[in-house]
Image (cartoon, grey):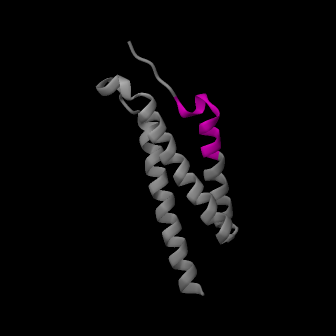
């Protein structure tokens, strides 16, 4: 028996997509405060979803297999964090 659950099956996936899109928009608009806040929220939301999923399914133990979407979400959070660091360095250099 197997079952697949996607983050987009509920509202959580849409919230994450909106956060990431807004993060990119404010980065290109050079609004540093909004960019940092939204980037932080995106990272926290991604990590929260991963931890929540893991804790909800812990009773199934080794039967759980995480798909590409789960890992892409975590990789995306790391990329956003790297983007924030690069943005901050560029902002300091230009100041």
Residue at position x 70%, y 68% from top?
29
Residue 59 screen position, x and y as percent:
37, 24
Q: Nearer the viewer, residue 12 or 57?
A: 57
Residue at position x 41%, y 42% from top?
71
- Residue 52's place in the image compared with 63, above or below, is below
Q: Quadrant of residue 27?
A: bottom right
Count of residue discs: 0
Q: Is residue 80 left or right of residue 11?
A: left
Q: Quadrant of residue 51?
A: top left
- Residue projecting furthest to the bottom: 95
Residue 13 screen position, x and y as percent:
59, 38
Magenta region: which residues?
6-17
By secondary structure, the bulk of the magenta-drawn segment is best described as helix
Q: Is residue 61 left or right of residue 57?
A: left
Q: Is residue 36 left or right of residue 52?
A: right
Quarter of the figure that contains the C terminus = bottom right
Q: Quadrant of residue 63?
A: top left
Residue at position x 45%, y 39% from top?
70
Residue 28 screen position, x and y as percent:
66, 66
Quarter of the figure that contains the N terminus = top left
Q: Is residue 8 magenta?
A: yes
Residue at position x 53%, y 66% from top?
84
Q: Is residue 19 left or right of residue 53?
A: right
- Residue projecting furthest to the left: 62
């Amino acid at each position: 028996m197997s079952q697949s659950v996607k983050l987009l099956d509920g509202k959580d996936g849409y919230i994450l997509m909106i956060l990431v899109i807004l993060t990119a928009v404010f980065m290109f608009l050079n609004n540093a405060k909004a960019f940092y806040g939204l980037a932080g929220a995106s990272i926290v939301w991604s990590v929260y979803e991963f931890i929540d999923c893991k804790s909800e399914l812990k009773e199934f133990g080794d039967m759980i297999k995480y798909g590409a979407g789960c890992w892409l979400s975590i990789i995306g959070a790391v990329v956003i964090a790297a983007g924030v660091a690069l943005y901050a360095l560029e902002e300091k250099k230009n100041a």
